[in-house]
Amino acid sequence: MKCALVIGGSGMLTDVSILLAETGYLVYVVGRSTEKMNNLLKKSNDNKNLIPVFIDYSNEQSLNKKIDEIIQENNTIHLIVAWVHSYAEHAIQSIINGIPSTSESSRFVHVLGSRSNLDKIKTELTIPNHCFYSQVKLGYMMQDDEKRWLTHEEICNGIIKTINNKKNVHVVGMLS
Ligand SMILES: NC(=O)c1ccc[n+]([C@@H]2O[C@H](COP(=O)([O-])OP(=O)(O)OC[C@H]3O[C@@H](n4cnc5c(N)ncnc54)[C@H](OP(=O)(O)O)[C@@H]3O)[C@@H](O)[C@H]2O)c1
C-alpha cells in the first residue's frame, strides 16, 4: 500500500487527506487538535486509511521521530503534501531529509501562500534526486469585481491537480 503524509491535513487540506485515503493511500495526517482530527475522521466515509499524527511540526525532534517511525512501518513515504506555517522554518527540510533513497522516488508537494517567493524557497532547500518536489501557490479569485480568498474546495482541487499532473509549479487562482 502506498503511504502519504499530509502536514496540516486536518485544516483546509481535509479533502486532500480524505481523497488520498479513498484512492488507496495509507494517509498520516499531522495536526495538534483532536477536535479538527475528529471532524476529518467523521467527514470521511471510510476512515480506516486515515491515521492521526498529533505532533507540533515546529518541534523538530518530534517531527523527525515520527517520520522515522512512518518510514520504518512503510519503507518509504510515497507522497508528502505539506502546508507548514513559515515560523516552523526547518520543518520542510527536516521532512525532505527523512525521505529514504529507494528505487521509487517520493513526491513532495509544498503548499505556499500568495506572498511566498517560490524560487527563493526552492533555492534554499536541498532536494535530493529521489524526491520530486513541486510547489503549489495559493492565489485569489475575483468574484463580483472583488478579490476573495480561495475556498477549501478550490485549494484542494488545485493540490490534487498538481499531484496528478506532476507539474513543478502550479498556481491556484490568480496572482496580482
Ligand atoms: N490564498 C488563499 O486563498 C489562502 C491561503 C492560505 C490560507 N487561506 C485560508 O486561511 C484559512 C486559515 O489558514 P490556516 O493556515 O490556519 O490553515 P488550515 O489548513 O485551516 O489550518 C492549518 C492546519 O495545519 C495544522 N497545524 C497548524 N500549525 C501546526 C503545528 N505547529 N503543528 C502541527 N500541525 C499544525 C492545523 O491543525 P492544528 O490546529 O490541529 O494543529 C491544521 O490542520 C484557511 O482555512 C484558508 O481558508 C487562504
Image (spheres, rainbow, N blue to C red):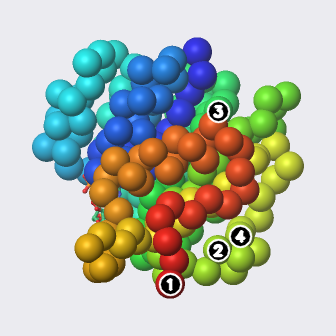
> In the image, what residue occupies the spot 56% across and 27% down?
3
**Is the C-beta of the residue carrying label 4 under 8 Å from the nearest atom of ligand 1?**
no
Which element is circle 2 on? helix
Q: Are marks 4 and 1 in contact (CB under 8 Å)?
A: no
21 in relation to 77, above or below: above
Q: Amino acid at mark 3?
A: His
Which element is circle 1 on? loop
Q: Quadrant of ligand 1?
A: bottom left
154 in relation to 99, above or below: below
| Distance between mark 3 and mark 4 Cα atoms | 20 Å
Residue pointed to by mark 1: 176
Task: Count residues near mark 2 (Cα–Cα under 10 Å), then give few for <14, some for 14-19, many for 20+.
Answer: some
Q: Amino acid at mark 1?
A: Ser
> In the image, what residue occupies the spot 32% across and 34% down?
52
Residue pointed to by mark 4: 122
Name the image quarter holding residue 9: top left
What is the x, y in percent for residue 168?
A: 72, 56
Which-is-in-front pick, marks 4 and 1?
Answer: 1
Of label 1 and label 2, which has the lower sequence position?
Answer: 2
What is the x, y in percent for residue 70?
A: 53, 32
> In the image, what residue occupies the spot 36% across and 26% down?
50
* Quadrant into which the N terminus falls: top right
Which-is-in-front pick, marks 2 and 3?
Answer: 2
